[in-house]
Every structure is written in C-alpha cells, then in structure tokens.
C-alpha cells in the first residue's frame, strides 16, 4: 500500500517503521507473516534484501507440497537458495525426508528468517 505525503509516495510499512522508531529502516522492512498488507508493528522487522528473500511462501507452481522439494525420477530432490546460490541438499526416497533436509538447511542458513511453508 502506498501513502502520499507532500506528493511523494511511500510504502505504508516504511512509514510505520518511521513512526514507531523515529528513523527510516536501515534496509528493507520484512513482513514476518509474508502478508504485505499486514503492517501491524509486531509483524514488521528490519531486514536485508537477502533476509527478506528468505522469508517467502511456497511457490504456487510447487507440486510436492513441500518447500524446497521436487520430484526427481522416482525419488525426491531437496535444494535451497542462499546467498544467490542454489545448493543441492541430496536425493531422497521420500518427499518427507527431502523436506527434513530442507528444514535443517533453512534453519542453519536463514536463521530467524527461515520459512518452511
């Protein structure tokens, strides 16, 4: 949502950050629940672009039902993107095993910005 102040457009979450802290965010403002319209203060946190990119929902084109997991022949492959590089986590017999590998890597690589669904 954009808000015009003196004919200049600002994103509502950036204005909320300014209002609550008295200063502009150092980086980007991340919506913890990934809902860009939810600008409640407790849903906002300062983030770098990479951190903000880590907190994304499962893609609508995902067919496995698990973030970071895709079909590979009769088995399942797990991958994760971190620091602009896609990392191969392995091939597994079940999608649940592949997802467990993704979750462990996401916790390690993305910390509090890791999102699992």
Image: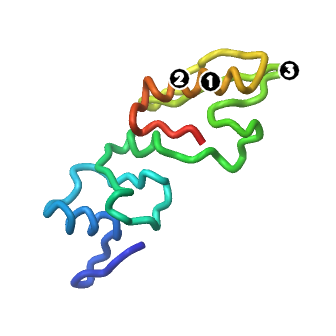
Q: Position of residue 103 (x, y in %)?
A: 56, 28
Q: Is residue 94 above or below residue 10?
A: above
Numbered label attached to residue 100: 1
The numbered mark, 3 or 2, whose residue comes first in the sequence reads: 3
The residue where tag 2 is placed is 104
**Label 2 secondary element:** helix
CA gap, disc 3 and disc 1? 18 Å
Q: Position of residue 105 (x, y in %)?
A: 51, 23
**Label 1 secondary element:** helix
CA gap, disc 3 and disc 2? 23 Å
Q: What's the residue at 49%, 60% (across, down)?
A: 35
Task: Say which of 95 and 85 sits in front.
Answer: 95
Q: Is residue 4 above or below residue 40?
A: below
Q: Position of residue 20 (x, y in %)?
A: 21, 64
Q: Is residue 52 left or right of residue 62?
A: left
Location of the C terminus (image quadrant): top right
């Amino acid at each position: 949502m954009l808000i015009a102040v003196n004919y200049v457009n600002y994103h509502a979450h950036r204005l909320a950050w300014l209002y609550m802290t008295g200063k502009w965010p150092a980086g980007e403002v991340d919506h913890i629940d990934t809902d860009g319209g939810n600008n409640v203060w407790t849903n906002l946190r300062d983030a770098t672009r990479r951190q903000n990119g880590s907190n994304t929902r499962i893609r609508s084109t995902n067919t496995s039902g698990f973030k970071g997991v895709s079909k590979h022949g009769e088995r399942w492959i797990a991958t994760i993107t971190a620091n602009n590089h896609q990392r191969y986590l392995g091939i597994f017999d079940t999608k649940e095993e592949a997802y467990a590998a993704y979750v462990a890597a996401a916790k390690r690589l993305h910390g509090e910005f890791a999102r699992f669904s």
